[in-house]
Image (cartoon, grey):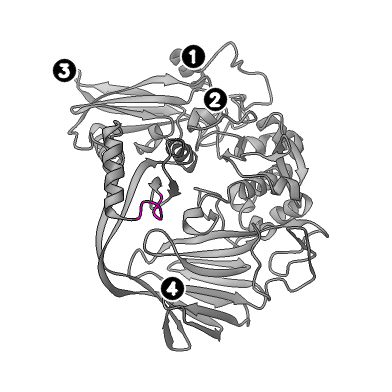
Amino acid sequence: MFISPPRNLLKVAVQRVGGLVIALGLVAGGALPSFAKDVLLQVGVVQRFGDEDRDQLTISGVGNDDLTFTAVNNQGEKVTLQGKQGTIAISRRAVPRKLAEVLVLGDHATFETAEDDALRWQAQGIAVEVTQPGRWQVWAKRDVYDSPLVRRWLLADLKKQGHQLPYLESVLLDSKPQAMVVINGQSYPADRVTVTAAKNQIQVTEGEKKFVYGGWLQLQPNSYGNYTLVNHVPLETYLRGVVPHEIGPGAPPTAAKAQTIIARTYALQNRRRFAADGYELCATTHCQVYYGLSGTTPRADEAIKETAGQVLTYNNQLVDALYSSTAGGVTAKFSDVWNGEERPYLQAVIDSAQPIWNLSTQSLADEATFRKFINLQEGFNETGRKFLRWRYPATLAELNQDLKKYLTNRRHPLADFTTIYDMKVTRRSPSGRILLLEVLTDKGVVELAKNEARSAFGPPRSTLFYLEPTYDANQRLQSVFFVGGGFGHGVGMSQFGSYKLSQLGWSAEQILAFYYPGTQIRQLNEQILGQTPRP
């Protein structure tokens, strides 16, 4: 979907061909090569603004540029104001006492597994939406199950069918956050605020954080009773705020190009993530790190220019362009980490330019073989990197605290346990990732599947680990060492692995073919862009 920007967003020639915006030069984000396709993205750069009454944003023009603020209140009244700086603060507005309630069907660490859970509920005839109030959640769709009676009827029916995890999240409200726009000493209440600048550069200050964004901004309500500040930004400009922060300013040139193609593909393929909140992507590691025009680098800008419009495809469709910092010597299949449909191009690959390990004959699903692999440190693309291998301790008290917090947040029926008795990895994938970790407590066994094994405890940096428990003289658990490798999910390209391949003289095309077997780099076109995003 293409959303028309304010009239002053594009200050040079713009041509529309079919559904595509053809930008012949963007003032705010660096020039694009002629006829490169550009897409306007909606990125939530400040999420859940107003969660705290002291929240405040200062919005400023860059240089001597004036800003235009258009504020719309809850009665639909609109006021347009101009100034070089404005403030958006929070006050409390009294509302008639009412019940704010959602039926939570699932609670997950990642969008990918939440989306798969949503599909399973849909297959049972239940309308759902994926949200992110903190962790990712699947809600019974609010405009379908729109009354307390209907929600309770559905919950009772699900419990009768044996579903134990769904629950109602309910709170009685008599007030709500109200955004206040302050410009030139005058204050205006507003539910939506649009901010544009003549030169399409706007500075946002939040506490100690200060970023300059290209494009334009809109503060809008979200699904959680507060607001999101959304940056409407052309894709190629957006990449200037992603590439140097994801791959690092000192990345070798072809690694930077590979990252750029992947980041472009990821953004286009994941525009559905925040549909429940009315925007597309976030600016954190739940999507891609995005700092606007703050911290741009010549190397990243060159990579963006040289790969303009290039995306990674499989069967002429955008790939699910997942990547992580450090794979730990072996990448993972999609299903090793998340639930959902397998992606043929996301495979377990030994992250080395040399044949140092054969997964077909030495599967890491075997515990003893896995431990042998984790003891290796030489010969990998990531050799010498901090998180190739790690070993972190946790006392029983720390383990109990972590697990209790995790289970409480999920409303898990065993959240009232007192202590952990033992922990054991019971299933691994051929790439060594934990598929099932069982935790024995005084209340029963907690099963942690895939990425949840990482989310439940503080020490692990990935799911590529084994446990070294210590016991006292009476064989009671005292502590556990988490011994493993990698940082992040380990699916797709290893960013530090790409450094090594680039240093060995590999091109961006070769790097991407190594980490995403069977894929092709294509120039973005209307057919590719028009494909329905997964699922």
Of labels 4 and 1, earlier in sequence is 4
The reply to whether callout 2 and callout 4 are in contact (CB within 8 Å) is: no
Of labels 2 and 1, earlier in sequence is 1
Where residue 413 is drawn, which disc sits there? Answer: none
The residue tagged 3 is 474
Rendered position, 468 above or below 244: above
Query: Which of labels 2 and 4 is toward the front?
Result: 4
The residue tagged 2 is 377
The reply to whether callout 2 and callout 3 are in contact (CB within 8 Å) is: no
Q: Position of residue 353 (x, y in %)?
A: 69, 26
The residue tagged 4 is 191
Of labels 2 and 3, earlier in sequence is 2
Query: Which of labels 4 and 1 is toward the front?
Result: 4
* Residue type highlighted by circle 3: Asn
* Residue type highlighted by circle 4: Asp
The residue tagged 1 is 369
* Residue type highlighted by circle 2: Gln
Query: Which of labels 4 and 3 is toward the front?
Result: 4
The magenta stretch spans residue 508: no
Q: Magenta stretch? A: 141-146
